[in-house]
Image (tube, helix red, strand yellow):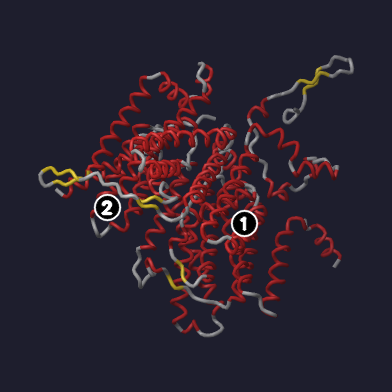
Amino acid sequence: MGSFVKGLKKVKWKNYINYVAIGIVTIVFGVLSIGSGLPSSTLYLLEKIAISIILAASLSLVVGFLGELSLGHAGFMCVGAYLGGKIAAMLAKTALGGVGNGILVLVIALIVGGACAGACGFIVGLPALRLKGDYLAIVTLAFGEIVKVIFQNSSAETFGGPIGLTTPRLDKKYLFIIGFILILVTLAVLQNFIRSKHGRAITAIRDNEIAAKAMGINVTKYKLIGFVIAAIFAGFAGVIFSYSQNNISSATFDYNYSIEILVMVVLGGMGNINGSIISATLITFLNVQLQNVLKGDLAVLKDLLYALILIVIVIYNNAPKLKNFRDKYSIGNLLQKIIKKKHDPSNVRDDAARWDVVPTKISMDEVLSTDIVVDDTGDNSADVGERRGAK
Amino acid sequence: MDFLITLVNGLSLGGIYAMIALGYTMVYGIAKMLNFAHGDIIMVGGYTILLFIPINPVLAIVAAIVFCVIVGITVERFAYKPLRGASPLAVLITAIGVSTLLQSLAQVIFGSAPKIQQINLGVLQVGELKIEISTIITLICSVAVMVALHLFVKYTRVGRAMVAVSEDKGAAQLMGINVNLIILITFAIGSALAALAGLFYFLKVQTMTTTFGALPGIKAFTAAVIGGIGSIPGAMVGGLLLGVVESICLSIPAISAYTDAIEFGILIIILLVKPTGLLGKKRREKV
């Protein structure tokens, strides 16, 4: 018993706060939904939030941690939505489709949708062996467009073609709960993956591919793994999406949808999954709410606002000239001043605990410059300062 | 005979793509960034032409070029210049933001309903061949623009400064070239080409919407990558190739619905065989 309590004390609860938060939300809304029932607009919002969070968190792995730009995330989602939705619709006609089997069918649909999307991720990841950066981005964009065109031109019997695929139903009361459970699964997989040695390898590739290669990291393998994992979760999100709609059409999964997911990742902070979750929740909430308020031509004001916020935030976070300003006034530093706790690297025993703040590239000048600090106490001995960050 | 018409149509469409692709590729070569907002500069040009064409066609063309150059320069100054030296991903995302911004601004000003303006320049008949005059004008103008641009880059001081900046920014600066000015000029030229492309694309589709530039933008981007992004002859070759492929695909009923998929498929295959595009330079990476 004593050892168990000791074990509990050792657990770094800070790392699990996201699970706890999402778990609480799931339980509260789940009980409300099953017990007293929630309005359908709230259920719709919750489903949308679950889908966005899964998409943003999985894209964050590719963009934030692997450092490759993917502009075709909606394409993977499209594959998941169509194939998962189709298999569920087919199963619903067989013996499995009986009452009470809805969840089982959904699970099968998730497996099929995720696997197919994962396979596509593998195919798209293959060019990653030869392509870099911008070229890879255009291939992912091309992939998304190809998937869209293929489903658009499918026959009415297979995937519904331009009319769209009629998708299976599940009681709305339960659908969002499954969505939220999937968020927890996504988080568990991604967080543990990133904190494992594989995750370290992936961030190493992001920071310096040549150095990573020199350290013996199999760049090809890890890029593929990153793409496939992200694609599988996008496929899951697609299946949930197809369940949340009466009818899905491939036009939904266009380039702009991929961009919207990318915006969530960027606004949440690159390489920060919790940030992606928060920004996905906020953006989806605003999206759905603004859709109700802004009708017709006014709806575009929302896009205008997003575009402006996106530009300002990216410039603020990245402009080289604003670096000093950022260092002075960043929220992290201000908090540190208030708490008066200085960050001491030797104090971080388990640096894997800081998985969400993987240090970014150190610029070459910083590493190379050695400052000579002249001691003005009078004994004229020159002192070689710290190699890094002495300035 | 049908094939000849298909080919001429394809080359004319390819000319439009090539003009847009030149904007992408020049900016990429010099500023090392993918200017995703380039497609929306075409849209700006299209709307300007739509506004001014009832007054005077020549004025419309001039106004479109001037206005596009102003928009291009403004975007460069306020959105891209602060990010010079930042990570390419940050610049790319800003460009995507600018693209959305321009589209939604256009929608606020002009509304989301498509605007249709019929412009009929007549049909040229040579024997049994019937070709629209606008197609021929597009083809001739795009070839002229490409030749002019090639001569400009090769023989003028500014053009050679552009080549120098694209090869080594630091060394160019040491040689007394004003790098910021050169980048600005590149954006201006790219935007002027986009305005022309907007004119010709408008002659082709005759319908104006806020996403007018999105499709030719993405296609031209594909063309630039096929030809090898950063290479000016590559953009021309890629653009013409893509235009002809599109025209041929559209003329065959069995595969016409899959035209976009085929074009993007070609892109992926070419990149797999030649990772830097058809005429792209292979760069050795130094540590």
Q: Nearer the viewer, mark 1 or mark 2?
A: 1
| Label 1 crowd (10 A; few <14 / some 14-19 / many >=20) | some
Q: Position of residue A325 (x, y in %)?
A: 72, 35
- On the same chain: label 1 and label 2? no
Q: Chain of mark 2?
A: B
Quadrant location of residue A26?
A: bottom right
Position above or below: A273 against B161: below
Image-quadrant location for residue A391 = top right
Asked whether, in this view, residue B96 is left or right of residue B6, the answer is: right
Please name the amino acid that badge 2 sits on: Cys
Identified by mark 1, the residue type is Ile
Q: Secondary structure at mark 1?
A: helix
Residue at x-position 75% and y-position 39% = A329
Secondary element under disc 2, as helix, strand or loop, is: helix
Q: Which residue is mark 1?
A: A283
Is A386 left, or right, of B80 in this rendering? right
Q: Quadrant of the C terminus of chain B?
A: top right
Please report, as a chain letter, where disc 1 is located.
A
Q: At which x and y percent is residue A353?
A: 73, 50
Q: CA distance from mark 1 to mark 2?
A: 40 Å
